[in-house]
Amino acid sequence: MANFGVTIAKGAVAYSPDQAVYCATELGGWHWAVKAQIHSGGRGKAGGVKLCKTYNEVRAAATEMLGKTLVTNQTGPEGKIVQRVYIEVAEPFEREIYLGFVLDRKVERVRVIASKFGGMEIEEIAKDHPEEILQIVVEPAVGLQAFQARELAFGLGLNLKQVSRAVQCILGCYRAFRDLDATMVEINPLVVTKDDRVIALDAKMSFDDNALFRRANVSDMRDHSQEDPREVQAAEHNLNYVGLDGNIGCIVNGAGLAMATMDMIKYAGGNPANFLDVGGGASPERVAAAFRLVLSDKNVKAILVNVFAGINRCDWVAEGVVQACKQMTVDVPLVVRLAGTNVEAGREIITKSGLPIISANSLADAAKAAVAAVPAA
């Protein structure tokens, strides 16, 4: 965001305690903040942000964080492993402000949210101080205007010097949001110093995965260790995958059909283990990759393959299913439902394979069969 005119505190990334100390010496100053770099908020309350007054304290804080699992209110009980820390010059400040930009899908606009209560989660502010939340909806044809940024700044109770600097920050954040294909920008806190500077002290950004191909400066910073390894593996094969907590693995072509399949599994009394859309070009190799991905989840006790072939072909999918079963150990019940192009040829391939595959003619029957096939706990 500094490239878009937002004032930030000086800082650097470190991967070891020694590097953390080196960063602190290079940055200068008398106080430093050591911040765990994980994909989660609420780090401060969980011990993921330490204020240090000496180099020894910087070393100790980095040693304590690096390689450890940090559990916050957003990570869940499994937490996330800290593999890098950010060393930042800690500057004294007088006020904390919350500032956020989010893509509001209901109104199809960017919504700017601000509050005098910085340092708190936006959910807490909305619950405890809803009247203190300021909001502006940006008209995409013209973008965020300076008068709107000034309106926010005055609403936050800033003085004239602070307002001009806050406007620069707000407009810079919007440009970063727009030009980097972000879906969320959150600065919490945005602080005001004694000499009326406005500094983004901590920020989080989320980006549109579909636009990363044209944002090399963003994709280069991607930390796959912070992501679900199954989703990383899926991305390598251009599979749309989201891991869930159930025990019935789903392999489906088409996002809408995948959602319907998950709904039918729930309706039949089961729980899907994942959302997986193999897409329109489900070649045998791609189906086999989907099988490997689903079977990597140890919670999966049954697999449901549901394909409605239009652009796709049922015989291709059937070949992929048979290929996957022969290449790897599929030691869970397998239910296959095929419909559409070349469906008879696809069913014949599965029948002639001699594999213990449960065939179903409808989605409802397939879901019931998959739920019934899950071994009793």
Image (cartoon, helix red, strand yellow):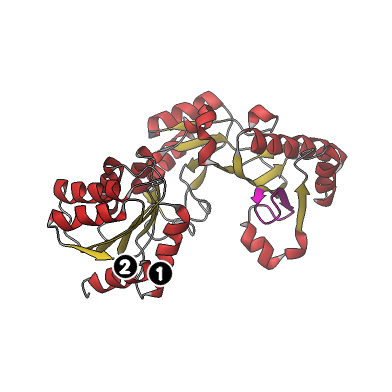
Amino acid of disc 2: Ala
Q: Residue furthest left?
A: 354
Can you say which quadrant of the picture contains the N terminus? top right
The residue lying toward the viewer, choosing from 89 and 371, is: 371
Answer left or right for 220 relative to 178: left
Tell me whether circle 1 and circle 2 mark residues in contact (CB < 8 Å). Answer: yes
Query: Distance of mark 1 from mark 2, alpha carbons?
Result: 9 Å
* Residue 144 in view, yes or no: yes
Q: Is residue 370 highlighted in magenta?
A: no
The residue stretch that appears in magenta: 102-118
Q: Residue at x 15, y 62 (%)?
A: 356
Q: Residue at x 36, y 75 (%)?
A: 268
- Label 2 crowding class (10 Å Cα cut-off): few <14, some 14-19, many 20+? many
Occupied quadrant, residue 6: top right
Q: Position of residue 72 (x, y in %)?
A: 46, 56
Q: Residue at x 31, y 66 (%)?
A: 361
| Residue 263 in the image: above or below residue 326 | below
| Residue 4 in the image: above or below residue 356 | above
Q: Is residue 103 highlighted in magenta?
A: yes
Can you say which quadrant of the picture contains the C terminus? bottom left
Q: Earlier in the sequence, mark 1 or mark 2?
A: 1
Q: Secondary structure at mark 2?
A: helix
Q: Residue at x 35, y 39 (%)?
A: 237
Residue labelled with disc 1 = 264
Amino acid of disc 1: Met
Q: Looking at the rendered structure, which numbered label has been put on residue 366?
A: 2
Q: Position of residue 25 (x, y in %)?
A: 50, 26
Task: Tally the numbered discs.
Answer: 2
